[in-house]
Amino acid sequence: MWYFIIPLIVGFGIQMGLYIHLRESIRSKILSGSAATKTLSASGGISSASMVACCAHHISDVLPILGLSTAALFLTKYQTFLMTLGILSNLIGINLMLKIIQTHRLFHDTSVFGRLMKFDMSRILNYNIFFSVLISIIFLINLWW
């Protein structure tokens, strides 16, 4: 499952870096109580959800010992879906944080963010969410048939 684990680790690392950048930028600009703070909280929730989806496949190792074999079979069957869901939510979380950075101009024009912010992050986020939902639906249909 390394081909799922590596993108999850990289995505979560990027989210952590963006989260720290946002938190420090918000503190320095004293934007507390603003929309940036609320959106940052939401993106933190997405990061947490992606990590739960990532680590849920390890629960299937322990459940039979606890007498929950049916739950273990369920998690084993949907392990690939949960890992894919984790990767997709990582992408959405990264995109959401980049949108916050762009909306509140929490970057310098000469930095890496400056070059990246030439793209419309709101539009990319909408595409990202659409394709993530589409991929998830297709994935679930394939699992059920």
Image (tube, grey):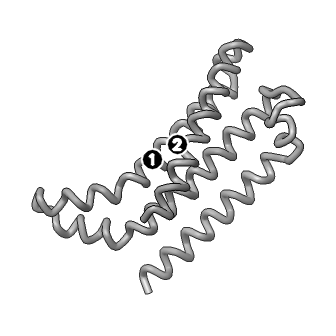
At a point 34% along the width and 59% down the height, the residue shown is 57
* CB-based contact (under 8 Å), mark 2 and mark 1: yes
Left or right position of 10 against 54 = right
Location of the N terminus by quadrant is bottom left
Q: Is residue 81 above or below residue 128?
A: below
At a point 72% along the width and 35% down the height, the residue shown is 100
Rendering coords of residue 136 (x, y %): 55, 68
Front in this rendered view, residue 113 or 53: 113
At a point 80% along the width and 36% down the height, the residue shown is 112
Q: Which mark is residue 114?
A: none
Indicate the amino acid at tag 1: Met
Rendering coords of residue 81 (x, y %): 45, 67
Residue at numbered disc 1: 51
Q: Is residue 106 above or below residue 12?
A: above
Residue at numbered disc 2: 47
Location of the C terminus by quadrant is bottom left
Rendering coords of residue 83 (x, y %): 46, 61
Q: Secondary structure beneath disc 2?
A: helix
Gap in Å between the C-alphas at discs 2 and 1?
A: 6 Å
Residue 61 lies in what quarter of the image? bottom left
Rendering coords of residue 89 (x, y %): 56, 53
How busy is the neighbourhood of tag 2: few (under 14 within 10 Å), some, or many (20 plus)?
Answer: many
